[in-house]
Each structure stands twice: as C-alpha cells, then as structure tokens.
Amino acid sequence: MLFPTLSFGLFFLVVFTVVWAASGSNEWRKILLLVASWFFYGAWDWRFVALLIGSALLNWGSAELIWYNREASAGRRRAIMIAGVAGNLLILGFFKYYGFFVEQLGDVLRVAGYARDLPLMQVVLPVGISFFTFQGMSYLADVHAERLAPAKLLDVTLLMSFFPHLVAGPIVRGSDLLPQFEDSPRLTRDMASMGLVLIVWGLFKKAVVASELSTGLVDPVFFDPASHSQLDLIAAAYGYAVQIYCDFSAYSDMAIGIAALLGYRFPLNFNQPYRAASLQDFWRRWHISLSSWLRDYLYIGALGGSRKGFTRQRLNLMVTMLLGGLWHGAKWTFVIWGGLHGGVLALERIWDRVRPEGWPRLPKLLAILITFHVVVIGWIFFRAESFDAALAYLKGIGTASVASDVLTPLACALILFGMAIHFTPANLGQRLALQVRTLPAWALGLLVGLTILIVDSMRFEGVAPFIYYQF
Amino acid sequence: MPQDTPSPIDLPEAELDEAGLGWTFGVIAIASLFLLCANAVSLRDWIDDQPPGPTQQRAAEWADDWLDMTEAMGIGLPRKAIHDQWKRAEEARFPEHGEKEEGAEAAER
C-alpha cells in the first residue's frame, strides 16, 4: 500500500476516524493503531507481520532483561544488550545479506581452489526491515545506557510497527516516540496545518517530480548508457540526484504529516541537502535520522568517534560510511558509494587540520558546487546495477558521441525546480502552515482538494514504489 | 512532547488557542468530497483495478455512472484540461530535435 494511492487514502480515512473516535482510552487507541499498522504491512506480505511481532518481542524482552539486571555487573548488562543487538543483526543479515555473503564466499573459495556448491536460497526481502531493526537496536542501546526506561510490550511493538514510518523511515528512536505514547495525544491546528502541507508537498514531489524524472529520463539512460549522448548522461545524473531527493524526502514528509494528523511528532529527516557546503554538512541535512543514528550508535557508541586519536577517527569515519553504504543494500555499488563518502569526509577532516593558517576558505558557492558534484558521482554508483556499469556511465560522460533524444524541456524544468527548492527559505513550509491554520475548515478543505486534484492530473500513470522501500 | 530533535511540526510562532480535531475533520471531509466530485476518473480507475467479483462489478458500474454524471455537469473538466496540458508538456521536445526528425523523415521519403 503506497502513500500516494487511493487505497492508502481510504485506509487512512478509516484509521483517522476510528483512532480519534477511540481517543478516550489511550490503550485502545494504541491497539487500534497497532492493528492498522499490521494491516498496512500485511498488504505487502502477511507472513512478515509475524517477523515484525517477533522482532518487537526480541527487543522488548532484551530491554526488560537489561533493566532487570541493572544492579548486576556492567559486563552482564552489556552481554544482554549485545545478544539483543546480535538477534536484530541476525534477522537483518539473513533476510538482506544471506545471498550476497554466500555468493562472495563462493567466489573466495573458488579463487582459493576450494570451489564448493554453497546453499544458495532465494530469500524474500521484507519491506522496511533495515528501518525497524535499526529502531530496535537503538532502543536496546538507549535502555542499556539508561537514557530510556524500558517500555510496555504494546508500546515497543507500536514503536517498531507504527505504519507512517514502518517501511521507509524516518528512523524514529524510542526516546522520540515512546514518551508520546504515554498519554492520548491532542491534535492542534498547528500540527494539522503542517501535516497537511507536508502531505500535499510530498505528494507533489513523489507523484510529479520523482516519477516523471524516473520514467522519462533516469531509467532509460541508466538502463543503457552506451546508447545515450553525453548530454543525456549528464542530465540523467543530475536528474537522479533530484529524483532520489524528491522520492525519499517525499516519503519522509508524508510520514511526518500522517503521524502529525494522528497526533504524533516525528523528527526532521531532510533539510535542503544540496545546499551543503561540505560533505559533513551534507550528512547533517540528508536522511538525518540515519546519519544521526550512525553517528550516535556506531561512530561514537561502538567505534569511539574521535576519542582515540586522529588516525583512528578517520578510520572510524570510513568504517561508519562503508557500513552505512552496506545498510542500503547487499551490493558492492552501495559499499563503494559509502567508501566515496567516507573517503571525502576523511579528506575534509585532514584538510581542516593541515590547512595553513591564513589560507582563505573556498567561496561558499564554489564549496556547494563541489560538494554537490561529489554527491552526484556517488549517486551514479548508488543507482548503477554494477560497478562496471557505473564506470561505463562515468566514461560515457567523458567520451560518448551518440545522439539521443531522451532529454526534454519538461525534464530540464523539473531538474531546475528540484535544485531551486534547495535555495528557498528553509522554513517556507512552516510559513505556509502559519497562513493556512487561520483559514476556515471549508476553505482549507477546498484548497487541499484542489491541490491534490492538480497533482493527480499531472502525475505519471501508476505509482512506482519509493526508492527506499528496497532498503 | 519531546523537543530534543527538531521537527517541521514545531511552528515558529505561538500555538493557536483553537480546537484542532473538529477543524481537521472538516478539512479532510471537504477535501474528500471535492475530490469525489472533481476527480471521479481516479475513483473509476481505482475501482477498475480491484480484483474482479460481483461487488467490484457493482462498484465499477456505479463509478462509471458517477463519472458520466460529473462529466455531464462539467465538474471533471478542470482535471481534464490540466491533464491534457501536462501531456503536451511531456511530449514537447527541444526544437533542434524536432527539426532533425523532420529532416530524417523527409530524407526517408
């Protein structure tokens, strides 16, 4: 069930009505939200609802054990936490990486002269598994560090299953959402106004900008780069940068908006990432819930961050980004994408350290342009089917002499639009929400209806799944 | 609500001291009714895509009648006009390309 579809719209109308009607009892409200979330997830594959429940039980049980042993030795509590995290990693590893690692192992054995028939299996990837396992692990780490008290089974299950963030984030941590489950929420006009603005804006970015660029430009060019011109290859690389932003940020916007209409506050996940003046700045603006997760729990929590010296810090950065790349999928292209980001982040740190005193800094515009192009090169690896395909794409940008006709005025306009929205005031949506919150319900209802009608008239036939569903 | 992490939901001005739930219900109800009338074609397409069966067939007949009625009243015209305009924008090509194609077609002839 995709957000920008009528199926989801009808589902949400029912959930919205029933859940607010039941708000007299917070427990019943949460149970209804949980059942709705399972129904939402079951629309893809009912079997994986059991996985979701099992995963919640694992994290609830581990957190209870950590808390029960809080007077025991630190080593014992740490061992329970590690066992819980390992359980999450086993789930993630089996469903997401089993095939990849067995293939790599087969290659290594063949090279070493010990070729074997390894037990390859076609494992179906449950939608959103990377998101809910990361949520589970951060919950355990927070309970272990006593940043968070263990929550009730119902709350932990709802934290991990809550349908707005379930399949493509943002990764909402227990410390953000669990306190909100303690009481029945109140829907304010502010929340509703901003929620509606985010939903309609997300709908536009996904159904119009991302879908149009994907089907009209990016997919055909990345499918067969060799038969496209230099201009098409460059335009499709920029086009993919805009597409992935409009696709993923649209999901986050709609998720935040839907949660707001149900009375819950989700964290910001994107903040105009292509206006970043360094890669460090980019990661403070792109998929903020993942980058802050990796920073807090992996880079600082598990690896020690910068506490163990400068050389170790650079190594930690590289390891974090390589694993961040692998989080996206079991493919070498994601690892290379992570490595590229890790490498450039490390170079930025080194340059900060060795830059001679008095040397001027790059003009901001130039820094933004350089950062953006590093990101675009990374996206080519991220989007390409294989490492060789990515290299062929990059080579084509330098040498292709084929004439082709994929680039259209509309695609150009959408790329320019996708870039231009990064340079508008950061709180434009909030300013709009401040305006619409004072409108009478009938006027805002007509405005919302009219905007959705316009978006629906422009959208590409059918809705492609969100890019981040596969992660 | 926890405020440790920023959220776009936190508006930069003081909260309005007015009820939100009834107002939001009103907004959603009006928007839904508006779309039911002005976007009947999407409803018809969605029902046509559902698994076939007696209920689906009845719903499809109702959706067809509803679409005919809204079109007869001219309510569906704005959507059609925007859609046609968008299709024209999708089909537009850069002039050099159009000229090249015309040239190639002429050469083939």
Image (spheres, coloured by chain):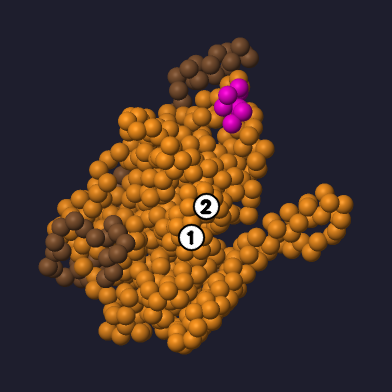
Chain colours: A orange, B brown
Amino acid on which disc 2 is placed = Arg
Residue under label 2, please give it: A312
Q: On the rendered structure, is A462 left or right of B32?
A: right
- Specify few, some or many for label 2: CA neighbours under 10 Å numbering under 14, 14-19, or 20 or more: some
- Specify few, some or many for label 1: CA neighbours under 10 Å numbering under 14, 14-19, or 20 or more: some
Q: Residue A430's x, y, as percent?
A: 23, 53
Quarter-wise, where is residue A362 in the image?
top left
Main SS type for the magenta part?
A: helix
Same subunit under labels 1 and 2? yes
Task: Give the residue at x 82% y 55%.
Answer: A109
Q: Residue A211's x, y, as percent?
A: 47, 45
Magenta segment includes A396? yes
Q: Are marks 1 and 2 in contact (CB under 8 Å)?
A: yes
Residue under label 1, please give it: A304
Q: Quadrant of the C terminus of chain A?
A: bottom right
Viewer-proximal residue, A398 or B21? A398
Q: Residue B98's x, y, as percent?
A: 49, 20
Q: Regarding mark 2 in the picture, which secondary structure is present there?
A: helix
Q: Which residues are magenta?
A: A394-400
Q: On the rendered structure, is A401 left or right of A103?
A: left
Q: In the rendered view, would you say A211 is above or below A81?
A: above
Viewer-proximal residue, B56 or A212? A212
Viewer-proximal residue, B84 or A110? A110
